[in-house]
Image (tube, rainbow, N blue to C red):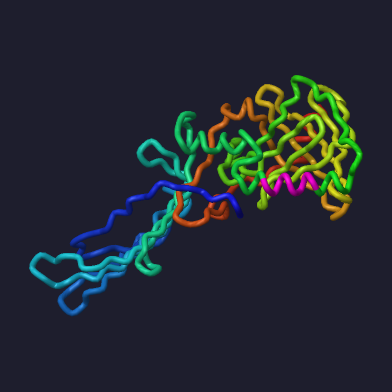
């Protein structure tokens, strides 16, 4: 993936001078206490907080303690993972993890809800929707694809008059616990409409499609017939929330035979939603958060009522 996430470092606290520990299982009333003495310098601590407190918490600390009068800590290896949502310092986290078990280098991942519209992380999410040409590589690739598209279709691209109230930029969104959010991982794949092209960002950058035909069924329903090289596809865009301009885009790809739905919000109303952001030393993934599986059939039925 050409897109690289830049994240702020997380300070991971180490545990010093610990001579005893406890281990407790979810729902268990028993506790096991392990004591360190002069002949046993390795203490392994495993703690699981009951599910009624948080969904999942697992922490493992392995400490090598030097037996000196000061009980100074020589080396600590830690593993920590906590699944939310939970609140720390006024921030709602959906997941936190940290470890230095691999080559001694600290690794961490924080997934949290960003509510500050002026924060750097929130603005970064919006910046993905500012242009489909985010860097020089995007420009080169887009120019190449557009040139090849013109060679395959030498006639002038059709131009369409999209209504002034039709949003030209759409940001993918997700749902978590029945609430819609922008998502830092998804925002990169923003879709753009011009009077002649539909531009969909994928892992390799912006991909142009010729808009062959366009139909405005209603102020909240639009149909597009697209072609890319020899591949034809159909877009059905239905706005399901007129106030926030949230829409379902149904893509019907004739070449692959695939048909799928995606939830979007218009760029101009995107600040109405909070954002889910990542702070990580590695390429982040969304598998550590239990996002809602969106019931598109139910959303369509609500529109028909």
Measured from the top left, where is residue 85 in percent x and y? 47, 44
Q: Is residue 293 left or right of residue 153?
A: left
In the rendered image, the vertical position of residue 203 relative to residue 90, given as above or below:
below
Which percent across, then down, holds residue 38?
A: 15, 76
Q: Nearer the viewer, residue 59 or 16?
A: 16
- The residue most toward the bottom is 39
In the displayed structure image, the side of residue 260 where residue 136 appears, left or right: left
Q: Is residue 141 magenta?
A: yes
Span shown in magenta? 140-147
Q: Is residue 3 above or below residue 197?
A: below
Q: Nearer the viewer, residue 212 or 111?
A: 212
Instruction: Depth check: give the residue in front, 60 or 239.
Output: 239
Q: Quadrant of the N terminus?
A: bottom right
Residue at 18% x, 79% y is 39
Q: Nearer the viewer, residue 99 or 193?
A: 193
Q: Is residue 107 above or below residue 41?
A: above
Q: Position of residue 194 (x, y in %)?
A: 76, 31
Q: Residue at x 22, y 65 (%)?
A: 20
- Specify the quadrant of the image occupied by residue 295: top right
107 horizontally vs 153: left or right:
left
Q: Would you place residue 30 above or below residue 148 in this image?
A: below
Provide the major secondary structure of the magenta segment.
helix
Image-quadrant location for residue 158? top right
């Amino acid at each position: 993936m050409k897109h690289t996430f830049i994240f702020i470092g997380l300070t991971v606290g180490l545990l010093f001078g610990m001579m005893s520990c406890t281990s407790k299982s979810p729902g268990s009333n028993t506790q096991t206490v392990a004591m360190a003495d002069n002949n046993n310098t390795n203490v392994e601590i495993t703690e699981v907080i009951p599910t009624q407190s948080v969904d999942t918490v697992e922490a493992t600390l392995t400490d090598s303690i030097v037996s000196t009068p000061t009980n100074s800590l020589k080396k600590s290896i830690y593993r920590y993972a906590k699944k939310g949502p939970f609140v720390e310092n006024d921030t709602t986290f959906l997941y936190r993890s940290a470890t230095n078990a691999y080559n001694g280098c600290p690794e961490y991942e924080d997934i949290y809800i960003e509510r500050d519209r002026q924060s750097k992380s929130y603005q970064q999410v919006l910046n993905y929707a500012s242009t489909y040409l985010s860097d020089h590589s995007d420009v080169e690739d887009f120019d190449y694809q557009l040139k090849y598209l013109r060679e395959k279709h030498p006639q002038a691209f059709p131009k369409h008059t999209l209504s002034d109230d039709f949003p030209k930029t759409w940001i993918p969104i997700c749902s978590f616990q029945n609430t819609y959010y922008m998502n830092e991982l998804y925002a990169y794949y923003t879709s753009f409409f011009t009077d002649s092209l539909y531009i969909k960002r994928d892992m390799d950058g912006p991909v142009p499609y010729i808009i062959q035909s366009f139909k405005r069924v209603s102020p909240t329903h639009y149909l597009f017939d697209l072609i890319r090289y020899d591949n034809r596809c159909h877009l059905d865009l239905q706005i399901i929330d007129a106030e926030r301009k949230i829409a379902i885009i149904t893509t019907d790809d004739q070449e692959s035979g695939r048909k799928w739905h995606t939830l979007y919000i218009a760029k101009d109303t995107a600040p109405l939603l909070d954002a889910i952001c990542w702070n990580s030393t590695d390429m982040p993934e969304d598998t550590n958060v239990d996002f809602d599986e969106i019931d598109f059939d139910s959303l369509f039925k609500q529109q028909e009522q």
